[in-house]
Amino acid sequence: MRCSACANQIVDFDYLDSSLQRSLSAWSKIKTRRETRLCAKHQRKLTQAIKRARFLAILPYVNK
């Protein structure tokens, strides 16, 4: 099974994109590769985009 980002030819993840919220758990933890169905390369890029969004206060660090 191919990575969904590879199949759709996604190069980078935008940290301003609101769809990053889907890659977070209920407690705002980043989901694993098994849960997101991404390859290692795209999981690293997704993680970096989420961390940038958190730093800029676009995404929360923790949900209560």
Image: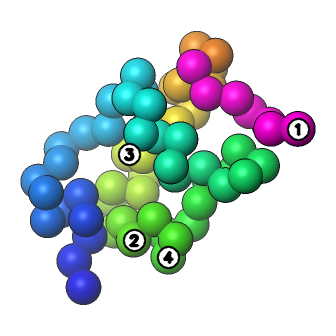
Q: Secondary structure at mark 1?
A: loop
Q: Earlier in the sequence, mark 2 or mark 3?
A: 2
Q: Secondary structure at mark 2?
A: loop
Crowding at dot 4, Cα within 10 Å, few <14 / some 14-19 / many 20+, comes out as few
Q: Badge 1 is on which residue?
A: 64
Give left or right: position of 28 versus 14: right
Type of the residue with mark 3: Lys
Q: Nearer the viewer, residue 18 or 41?
A: 18
What x and y, as percent, mark residue 16?
Answer: 41, 22
Q: CA distance from mark 2 to mark 3?
A: 13 Å
Q: Is residue 62 above or below residue 6?
A: above
Q: Badge 3 is on which residue?
A: 45
Q: Is residue 18 above or below residue 2?
A: above
- Mark 1 vs 3: CB contact within 8 A: no
Crowding at dot 2, Cα within 10 Å, few <14 / some 14-19 / many 20+, comes out as some
Q: Badge 2 is on which residue?
A: 37
Which quarter of the picture shows residue 31?
bottom right
Start and end of the magenta stretch?
Answer: 58-64
What x and y, as percent, mark residue 29?
Answer: 70, 50
Type of the residue with mark 2: Arg
Q: Which mark is residue 42?
A: none
Q: CA distance from mark 3 to mark 4?
A: 15 Å
Q: Nearer the viewer, residue 16 or 12?
A: 16
Name of the residue lying farthest toward the top: 56
Q: Badge 4 is on which residue?
A: 34
